[in-house]
Each structure stands twice: as C-alpha cells, then as structure tokens.
Image (spheres, rainbow, N blue to C red):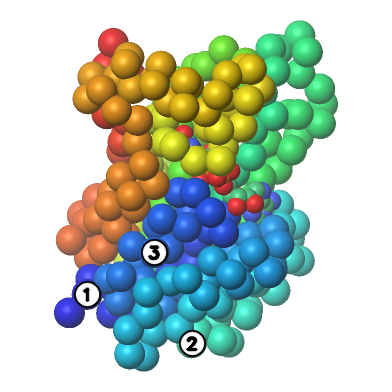
C-alpha cells in the first residue's frame, strides 16, 4: 500500500530538478503523475522514467504555467487522460537575478509570471475539481530567499508572495477538504543552482561546497530532501496541516 494509491498528482516544472524528484516520489508511493513543463518532449521523457506499478500511469504535458489557456488545457488533459486530479505541486520556476539598479522590467515580470501568476492559474484551474470532490492537496514552492537575498528582489518578492497565497488558500479551501502548504527549500543541487554558480563565475561544485560549509548540517540539499517533505505534506497524514510554510534548508536561515 502506497500513500498515494489511486491518486493523480500534477507536478509543474517536473522535467528535471526538484519537480522531477517529487514526481518520482509520488510515483514510488502509488500515484499516477502528470509531468508538466515548457517543452512537451522533455516532459514526456521525464514521465517515461517514472517508476510505475500496476494501474499507474504517467504523462508529460507541454504547458507554460504563466499562460491561462495553456494551463486550462493542461488541467483538462490531466483529468481526461488520468481520470481526475488530487494533488497539485506548483514547482515551475525561473530566476532572473540582478541587483535592483540593474533589474529590468522583464526580469521582474518573468519571475512574477512563472512563480506567482503560474501558481495562481494552476491552482484556480485545479481547485474546481478539488472543491467538487471535497478533496485536494496543494503544495507551493517558496524559498529561503523569501526572507531576503541580494540580487533577488524579484524572486524574493515572488517567493514571499507564495507564502501569503498559500495561507489564503488554506483559509478559503479548508472547508472543502483541501489542504494548501508550501515548502521553502534552502540550497538544492539542481540546474537552477548550477546556473547561479556559472553567473557568479564559479564551478557548480565550488558553490555547492561553499553552501555546505556554511550550513549547520554541512551539506547541500538534494531534490529527494524536498520530495520527502512534499510527500508528507500531500499525504493524508498531514490533513490537519494547512496554510503552512515548511523550511527544508538544513537550518540555513537559523542564524
Ligand atoms: P530547475 O531550473 O532545475 O527546474 C525548473 C523547471 O521549471 C524546469 O524544468 C523548467 O523548464 C520549468 N519551467 C520554467 N518555467 C516554466 C513555465 N513557465 N511553465 C512550465 N514549466 C516551467 O529548478 P529547481 O531547482 O528544480 O527549482 C524548482 C522550484 O524550487 C522552483 O520554484 C524554485 O524557485 C524552487 N527552489 C529551488 C531552490 C534550489 O536551490 N534549487 C531553492 C529554493 C526554491
């Protein structure tokens, strides 16, 4: 018996990184999974790698989460092809880091568009099904950068916005059997943090070591660390937990 037997989970930005790790974990625990990402073939390849048992399915869907029509048709496809929707993980993300005086309108708009508008559009489309069936789990990806991070005025604002969004979903949807929570990861070894290293003219390994040396648990995080917390928050064991943001960061922001 898996915790997600008979459930359908949708994970955005799941072609790689934290999203893929989370999709894998849901599949391992019995869910059918829709991998959503910008490029349909990358999403399909990721879906094909998921471990599936009897009766489980995985599909890859190309979708830009910041686009209303693209989101509506993706959610419609999930319901048609997988027979419903029970779990939504709003994980798709981008960075456009720059100090404030160099940050362009586009740097701001792209980050707000993917993180905040994307989470809003996906959640609005999914909640219709959640409310009708009186069951749903929403998990949003925030970040330790929500607490402030040099060069990330846009990303930090979006990630703190995600926390307010999550709290409000908790209040509005709680009466309909829907839980909404967020995870705020610290440094996780993915393509996103490797790209940050390259921008800082460092080797990815060098940036990982620097972060590990300054972290109370002396290591960086892996997608599996986030996936484990995601599985708990989206399971029925967490049905009395809602509106919360769980920092999964090895204690990075403790001081
Ligand atoms: P990643 O760059 O490895 O993966 C992000 C995925 O999102 C990619 O597959 C990308 O194609 C997809 N994506 C981007 N824009 C999209 C759009 N408009 N529509 C659909 N898909 C889109 O990043 P990651 O490190 O795995 O991060 C996943 C989430 O976790 C993000 O929300 C990120 O902000 C957050 N996060 C990451 C870290 C970290 O250290 N890696 C820390 C805190 C929070």
Q: Classify residue 235 by image quadrant.
A: bottom left
Q: Mark 3: which secondary structure?
A: helix
- Residue 88 visible in the snapshot: no
Other residues around mark 1 within 10 Å, as few (<14) / some (14–19) / many (≥20): few
Q: Nearer the viewer, residue 137 or 175?
A: 137
Name the residue rendered at 56%, 86% in the picture.
81
Q: Position of residue 161 (x, y in %)?
A: 53, 34
Distance Cα–Cα, label 1 vs label 2 = 19 Å
Name the residue rendered at 36%, 90% in the picture.
55
66 to the left or right of 18: right
Which numbered marker is on residue 83? 2
Distance Cα–Cα, label 3 vs label 2 = 19 Å
Q: Is residue 77 above or below residue 12?
A: below
Q: Which residue is mark 3?
A: 24
Q: Nearer the viewer, residue 234 or 135?
A: 234
Which numbered marker is on residue 170? none
Is mark 1 in CB contact (under 8 Å) with mark 2?
no
- Of the residues under marks 1 and 2, which one precedes in the sequence? 1
| Mark toward the viewer: 3 or 2 | 3
Q: Which residue is mark 1?
A: 2
Name the residue rendered at 46%, 27% in the picture.
205
Q: Quadrant of the C terminus?
A: top left
Distance Cα–Cα, label 1 vs label 3 = 13 Å
Q: Position of residue 153 (x, y in %)?
A: 62, 20
- Of the residues under marks 1 and 3, which one precedes in the sequence? 1
Answer with the quadrant where ligand 1 appears in the image: top right
- Residue 37 visible in the snapshot: yes
- Of the residues under marks 3 and 2, which one precedes in the sequence? 3
Q: Mark 2: which secondary structure?
A: loop
Q: Is residue 254 above or below residue 81?
A: above
| Mark toward the viewer: 1 or 2 | 1
């Amino acid at each position: 018996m898996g915790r997600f037997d008979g459930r359908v989970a949708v994970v955005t930005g799941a072609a790689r990184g934290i999203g893929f790790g989370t999709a894998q974990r849901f599949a391992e625990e019995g869910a059918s999974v829709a991998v959503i990402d910008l490029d349909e073939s990358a999403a399909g390849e990721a879906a094909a790698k998921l471990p599936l048992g009897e009766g489980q399915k995985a599909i890859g869907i190309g979708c830009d989460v910041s686009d209303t029509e693209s989101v509506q048709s993706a959610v419609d496809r999930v319901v048609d092809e997988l027979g419903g929707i029970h779990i939504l993980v709003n994980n798709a993300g981008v960075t456009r880091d720059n100090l404030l005086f160099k940050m362009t309108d586009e740097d701001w708009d792209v980050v707000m568009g993917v993180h905040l508008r994307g989470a809003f559009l996906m959640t609005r489309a999914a909640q219709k099904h959640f409310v009708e069936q009186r069951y749903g789990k929403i998990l949003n990806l925030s970040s330790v950068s929500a607490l402030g991070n040099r060069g990330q005025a846009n990303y930090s604002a979006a990630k703190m916005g995600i926390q307010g969004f999550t709290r409000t979903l908790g209040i509005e949807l709680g009466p309909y059997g829907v839980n909404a929570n967020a995870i705020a990861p610290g440094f996780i070894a993915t393509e996103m943090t490797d790209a940050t290293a390259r921008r800082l003219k460092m080797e990815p390994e060098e940036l990982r070591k620097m972060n590990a040396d300054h972290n109370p648990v002396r290591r960086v995080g892996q997608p599996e660390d986030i996936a484990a917390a995601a599985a708990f928050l989206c399971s029925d064991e967490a049905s009395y937990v809602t509106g919360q943001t769980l920092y999964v960061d090895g204690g990075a922001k403790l001081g």
